[in-house]
Amino acid sequence: MANSIDQIPAELPANHDDERTFAAPWQARAFAVAVTMCQARYFTWDEFRQRLMAEIAHDAGDHIEYYQHWLNALQKLLADKGFVADRELDAKVHEFAKPA
Amino acid sequence: MGKNHNAPESEPALRVKALEALLVEKGLVDPLTLDRLVDTYETKVGPKNGAKVVARAWVDPAYKKRLLANATEAIAELGFSGMQGEDMVAVENTPKVHNLIVCTLCSCYPWTTLGLPPVWYKSAPYRSRAVSDPRGVLREFGLELAPNVEIRVWDSSAEVRYMVLPERPKGTEHMSEAQLAELVTRDSMIGVTQVTLDSNSASQT
């Protein structure tokens, strides 16, 4: 009882986390890409959600950030739908990673 | 975006940037649309919308009736509609029943009335314990319910999004609708807390 604070998982808000909507700009971009493309009917929300659930379910509790799951789900969906192949994405990442 | 040119971008940041660039090249997304959407969710959509719905229901019994009968339409009356708000259900707290919302499998949440979910709502402990030990979860939020109060846990699914209609606190009979809306917190509409006379002085928004 006296040490009940120790039992509160860090994720619960007793230890209030940063309440900004997005913790980093990339999270906002990943969010916006998924929502915009759904609104433009390139895919349904349920198609995205199924992949998001799968990513979250595979999480072995190693505290991968939520938006990492989001991004992985988005990447898989875009590959499944033939919009962006993984190879193509890897090449672009490689290009951006190099100093100009 | 050019804070420090020497700092390497994180792996996900790089991947999102590459993904966005490819989608723009292919004409599948417009960066301006993305900007607008981010701005909307960062500044315009949030629990203040839900608070207006709750305050209206507290002062207008006819509205409350409509809200409980068809929340999507009643919420749209106040101008709030859109993604993740297409099929809304409002669940009412009473002295005998306390409602709690969760999405056990991912992070479904009523965006149009509450904005995007807080980090803890998406966490594994909340998603599992809201179902297995709701009373314990509420206790950690500082809410101790009497043993005879029934707790109903609502698991958001692909279609339905829930929001809690909290109880109007005692001693607010003299308050205007706008003043009442100020009292209503995000957490009270998720159902992890109740609305109190000083709940707007808490740190949350």
Image: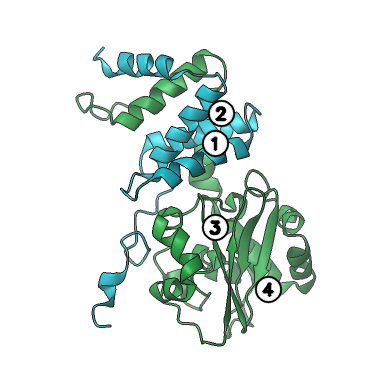
Chain colours: A cyan, B green
Using the image as rendered, state which of residue B132 and residue A68 is in the foreground. B132
Say yes or no: labels 3 and 4 on the same chain: yes
To which residue does mark 1 refer? B37
Q: Secondary structure at mark 3?
A: helix
Which quadrant, please, contains the N terminus of chain A?
bottom left
Work out whether B74 lies above or below A52. Answer: below
Q: Label 4 neighbourhood size at 10 Å, few (<14), some (14-19), many (20+)? A: some
Q: Amino acid at mark 4?
A: Trp
Same chain for mark 2 and mark 3? The answer is yes
Seen from the viewer's position, the closer of residues B56 and B157 is B157
Residue, x 56% and y 50% (percent of image)?
Answer: B108
Q: CA distance from mark 3 to mark 4?
A: 16 Å
Q: Could you tell me the amino acid type at mark 2?
A: Thr
Dots 2, 3 in contact, CB < 8 A = no
Toward the left, the furthest residue is: B6
Does the image show residue B205?
no
Measure the C-alpha gap from mark 2 to mark 1: 6 Å
Whether label 2 touches label 1, CB < 8 Å: yes
If you read the primary sequence from the N terminus, does the residue marked by circle 3 or circle 4 appear first? 3
B184 up-or-down from B197: above or below: above
**Which residue type does callout 3 highlight?**
Pro
Q: Chain of mark 4?
A: B
Between the C-alphas of marks 2 and 3, the distance is: 23 Å
In-image side of B95 versus B198 (left or right): right
Q: Which residue is mark 4?
A: B58
Label 3: which residue? B47
* Residue type pointed to by label 1: Leu
Chain letter of mark 2 equals B
Residue at which label 2 appears: B33
